């Protein structure tokens, strides 16, 4: 018998997030190190009458690939992957790093080349997702690498992680339905407003969201989940923001980031650590200095930053802003090759005010 | 740095057995437990300019599949598998059991149903192999399960196994070329003869091989390898044979098997253990009591039976006979749903005489 929280997570993903149906195909991408979760997903998929296809990698395959592959090999996309993007009914990516810095020293242009090779398939996936032909989800399997990045033992991290996934509850599927209701309520409350004013330590920022849509993130595409998000009007950001948690992009970390916005654009950017890399990324293209996302976390099961954005951006009592590409479904139109989320913590004195009405005070929703 | 013998095995498979070329596709089917070998194969494939596709399973997926899958799910073949059989340039199966009795209690009809679903793809694979469009190989990764079945520690088994694969040699690829030359020499020597007379403990058997072809097995399709084989004339077997090693079929083991042949047919069969199952298998169909194969082992790096036929049938100084289906390339025409190899050990007093000339005495080739 395995950890019942892993069974719970598999049930949530198969039956709540992806709602697998009889005869559907389900592509499971993971490191083999996530064996207990993959095995549980495999079994739960069979129980649902669907057909699981395993796409497992080993600890060293990704770094060997970038170390040894020629340009032609980097450009080649396996038929199994092609099928998954073009025809599978559902897919999941299980984050299962055993070394969160595994690819830190890969030449960025090789990673970019690979992303370019995968880009048509990613686009196809998003099109199929938008058309309702494909369900997808990103989740995580607790490893010592994630635990260490979060400053915990593996045992502590597992307790934290499965709590954040509501898998410490007697009926995790029911718990997610309930949590979803609260996230949906908040997204519906804010929809249709105009000005969002964020105040907190080192932060006084106004954004316009008029005509934009707020989307509730309720466990369908990420697990754990818990936020509602939009794309702010691209020339509206005005003021200063301080990001209190370190932020990672392409395997590199920056910390102590501050932005000053004028007419929606980052006109001043500083960082206590990694400032050169930060500036380099902001200069990627025209859209990289404008906001593609405002997200407001609703998962109060996540208390502290872990270094993994899948978790950190959901922390209840924080907001996150992403420079770069918008999500079209929000009405956002910013275009960029990057999308980099950074987190502003309002729990130690801060507020979110919407058209003059207080939405959140010191990290607690008050509506 | 990993065990250099694993690196050697990967080099042998990629560069000698399969001769992978730039741009080719290579489908690697294995349990994730064989990680060091799979990782080495992955890297060696990239070095050869070819494109590896991993098809990894977990320890519990096969038994979960047979436990939980409906008939529809058993009949479903994944697009990744379909592609591999129909279009890949090369494929390998890495035997990597962690429990050699994993599927012992699966209802045989469920396994048969799965084999039936896979049958058109297996046929396609054999056609493509015969046409030179597909290279394939079966190898093994040493696990405690195989070590235990062979009555060894894992460390001892690894020493034994890599020696049998010539991966204890400074240049395993060169060693295989040399070993191949000897197997080919023996196959060429016996080709064109008529009568094979096998004498040994509890054994006095005559077979006719007139017009049949002997094929050298020199590491292209199996690794380790070492035998030459044919399909004897189907009504020719006359006399008695004792099989000195236990024989496994569909996860079940029989031991102490003796056959008496008349006009090519097993007319009396006994076993010290598993006799009922043996008789049941011999009664599968008309061809199940006739010989589909005579093989003569040439790998003197394998000294003792291990319980795994991939290794045991190659033992230098043994012959093996298979009841059931012939290999068409030998000229054999026996048809059966089964092909069950059993091993007769001639090393403690025995001989193979071919048209009156001594080929082997007490397990040593004398030609």
Image (cartoon, coloured by chain):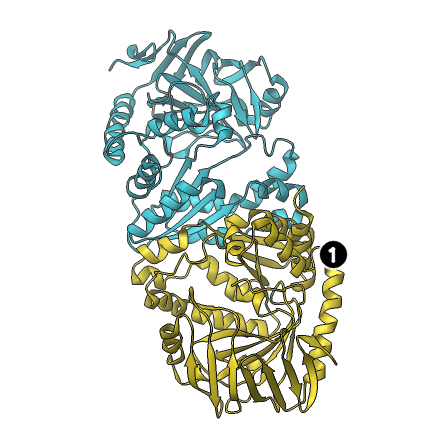
Chain colours: A yellow, B cyan
In the picture shown, does residue A162 fall above or below B363?
below
In the picture shown, does residue A75 fall above or below A319?
above
Q: Which residue is mark 1?
A: A169
Residue at screen point 45% across, 47% down: B124
User: Position of A151 compared to B355: left or right?
Assistant: right
Can you say which quadrant of the picture contains the C terminus of chain A?
bottom right
User: Position of B301 compared to A269: left or right?
Assistant: left
User: Position of B1 compared to A248: left or right?
Assistant: left
Residue at screen point 42% across, 85% down: A268
Categorize mark 1 by other alpha carbons within 10 Å: few (<14), some (14-19), many (20+). some
Residue at screen point 43% across, 29% down: B310
Residue placed most toward the observer, A242 or B358: A242
Residue A139 visible to the viewer: yes
Residue placed most toward the observer, B8 or B287: B8
* Secondary element at image label 1: loop
Residue placed most toward the observer, A352 or A131: A352
Quarter of the image where one finds residue A74: bottom left
Can you say which quadrant of the picture contains the N terminus of chain A?
top right
x%, y% of residue A240?
A: 51, 85
x%, y% of residue B158?
A: 40, 29
Residue B213 visible to the viewer: no
In the picture shown, does residue B58 fall above or below A328?
above
Chain letter of the residue carrying label 1? A
């Amino acid at each position: 018998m395995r950890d019942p929280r892993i069974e719970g997570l598999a049930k949530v993903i198969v039956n709540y997030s992806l709602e697998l149906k009889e005869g559907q195909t389900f592509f499971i991408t993971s490191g083999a190190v996530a064996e207990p979760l993959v095995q549980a997903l495999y079994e739960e998929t069979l129980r649902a009458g669907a057909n699981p296809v395993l796409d497992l990698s080993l600890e060293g395959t990704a770094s060997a690939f970038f170390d040894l592959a020629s340009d032609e090999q980097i450009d080649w996309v396996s038929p199994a992957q092609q099928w998954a993007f073009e025809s599978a009914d559902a897919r999941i990516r299980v984050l299962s790093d055993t070394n969160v810095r595994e690819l830190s020293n890969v030449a960025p242009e090789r990673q970019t080349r690979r992303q370019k090779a995968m880009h048509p398939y990613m686009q196809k996936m998003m099109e199929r997702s938008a058309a309702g032909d494909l369900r997808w989800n990103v989740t995580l399997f607790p490893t010592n690498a994630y635990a260490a990045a979060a400053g915990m033992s593996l045992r502590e991290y597992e307790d934290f992680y499965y709590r954040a996934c509501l898998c410490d509850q007697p009926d995790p599927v029911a718990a997610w339905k309930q949590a979803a209701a609260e996230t949906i309520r908040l997204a519906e409350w804010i929809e249709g407003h105009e000005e969002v004013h964020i105040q907190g330590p080192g932060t006084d920022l106004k954004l316009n969201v008029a005509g934009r849509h707020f989307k509730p993130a309720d466990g369908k595409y990420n697990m754990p989940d818990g936020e509602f998000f939009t794309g702010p009007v691209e020339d509206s950001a005005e003021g200063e923001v301080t990001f209190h948690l370190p932020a990672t992009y392409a395997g590199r970390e920056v910390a102590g980031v501050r932005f000053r916005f004028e007419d929606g654009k980052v006109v001043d950017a500083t960082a206590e650590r990694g400032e050169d890399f930060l500036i380099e990324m902001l200069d990627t293209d025209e859209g990289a200095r404008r906001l593609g996302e405002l997200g407001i976390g609703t998962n109060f099961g996540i208390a502290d930053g872990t270094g993994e954005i899948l978790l950190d951006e959901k922390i209840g009592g924080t907001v996150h802003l992403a420079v770069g590409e918008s999500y079209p479904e929000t009405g956002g139109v910013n275009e960029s090759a990057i999308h980099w989320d950074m987190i502003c913590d309002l729990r130690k004195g801060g507020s979110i005010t919407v058209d003059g009405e207080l939405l959140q005070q010191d990290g607690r929703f008050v509506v």
